[in-house]
Amino acid sequence: MVGAKPAKHADVVLGEDWIGPDAAAESEARAKRDRRGVIAMNRSPLARKIITFNLLAILVLVAGVLFLNPFRDSLVIQRERGIVIEAELISGFLEAQLPENAPVNLTVGDGPDVAGTLAALEIPNAVNIFVYDNAGGLIASTVGQERRPSPVPSLEGDNRSTLITDFLDNIWGGLSGIFGKENDGPVVETANEALVASLVSAALKGGTEVQSSTDVFGNTIFTVATPILQGGTPVGAVAIASAAGEIDQLVRSEREQVLQMFVIAILVSIGLSLVLASTIANPLSDLAAAAEIGREKNARRFSPNRVRIPDLTARPDEIGRLSGALRGMVAALYDRIDANEQFAADVAHEIKNPLASLRSAVTSLRQSKREDHKIKLMDVIEHDTIRLDRLVSDISNASRLDSELVKEDEEPFDLLTMIGNIGDFLGNDAREKGVEFITDMPSDPIVIDGLESRLAQVFVNLISNAISFCEDGDAIRVWVRKRENRVLVVVEDTGPGIPEQALTKIFNRFYTERPVDHFGNNSGLGLAISKQIVEAHGGVIWAENIRPTDADVTSDPLGARFVVGLPV
């Protein structure tokens, strides 16, 4: 092509990828892709939906984890068990110092040295121990007692950073107040003996009691009271109050880890969503843009440039299938447009011939003086009028054929019965002309799916053509054979055959190869319509001359053969 240039960024360009200087639609599509970049969020609703739905799943997951708070419940249970064990160990230590049979009165100091024992214990910071007598009176406590540093500093507290948790703490607190689990324990001001007083009376009855409370700052405090038994009789009670907010710091640390993973998951999800969107939204945007380029921006007129759908058929997914389907549809549409244009040109050409003959005959009729000339001219006018009427009727049938083939529903029918009925009807016409008519069909029925009336039109046309070319003494043979997945219907005659130059053109519209005395009796659309009907049924049709196997191709043929192949 003169002045053509290869497509941008291509090394080897063939077929539709070759761009001529007037390929404005393709140039505009390429310019849009270059301006768009990897992904255009503000112009791609699909990309925004992909990212939104991917993030929504993560948000629901993390919100569910934080709302259910399973790690806090686990830590609470573990801490309650731990503080109960601590209280029972101290109670057991004091019980070991009690005499076995002598009466004990912890109030007057009759028994173990409670204050000294508490002073000797290494207690974590902010944890207080209280010892009560059997009347519920406080004997000793660790409130205000100097604490020794822990031999394991790392166990003093969790000092991990909680930036994200602290930032979201106010919001989370509001949501927890609406949807979260409320603390069942009381709200207190400080972790003193008043906090454990309510548990001591129950503990003196012989049972261990544990309770979780919340101070005015929202920090959780665990309290436990367990009896000091002498021979199964309570002589006092040990109560422990944990450090305020001890468990909350652990919960914040655990929540911080979840939120950190949540942030990482969001970043990864956004990145993967962008990649996914670029592989889905961008190709779909290209396909839509290519289809939209066919119309001008004011949407009032169609662009004269042809729509070129991007070739994405190499993709092994639905987008590749969609691209192939759209390319096939567009190609079929343009083929149909080209065929209609060619058909319109052929119709105009074919109609001009009888019109020119009519005009000449009418002009000559006005000038003619002889009666015999007028009669001949009137015969010409009548012949051309009949020819025009036949031509217009055949053109009308041909133009409606496509839509009728699409609208009508295919149904199963017996092909042999249909051909047999046609043979019985047209066989009489052949015999009246002195032509022998032979049918050769299998005994078993052959059922196919299709439009019976349209396929009957094909075989009527083929047999009628054979009869018109045969003379007295010739023969016509119609035979049918079934193969594995197809059936062959053959119409052959012993007429003059088909000129070699006409074999490739015989199925073209308005082409006819008739004797001179048959001029004007056929429109040349019969075989073209037959081919269109057969191909619409997924079949094939072709024509050939009958010759002996070893005969020279330049020798005169023994007749003509038309073969129709249909799927079974």
Image (cartoon, rainbow, N blue to C red):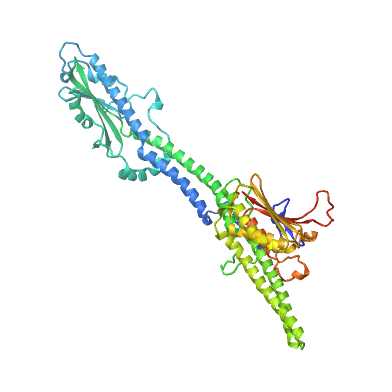
Most distant residue in the top direction: 101
Q: Residue at x 76, y 66 (%)?
A: 514
Judge whether 524 appears above or below 315 on screen: below
Residue 174 location, x and y as percent? 33, 45
Residue 74 location, x and y as percent? 35, 31
Task: Report the side of 216 relative to 311 (left or right).
Answer: left
Question: How many badges with numbers are in the image?
Answer: 0
Judge whether 227 appears above or below 480 on screen: above
Which quadrant is home to the N terminus? bottom right
Residue 461 location, x and y as percent? 67, 61
Q: Residue at x 21, y 19 (%)?
A: 228
- Give the quadrant of residue 473: bottom right
- Give the quadrant of residue 244: top left
Task: Report the side of 38 relative to 258 (left or right).
Answer: right
Between residues 212 and 471, which one lies in front from this camera angle?
471
Between residues 162 and 31, which one lies in front from this camera angle?
31
For the question of whether residue 507 can be seen, the reply is no
For the question of whether residue 169 can be seen, the reply is yes
Q: Which residue is drawn at 52% across and 46% down?
A: 273
Between residues 82 and 345, which one lies in front from this camera angle?
345
Residue 95 location, x and y as percent? 23, 16
Between residues 423 and 380, which one lies in front from this camera angle?
423
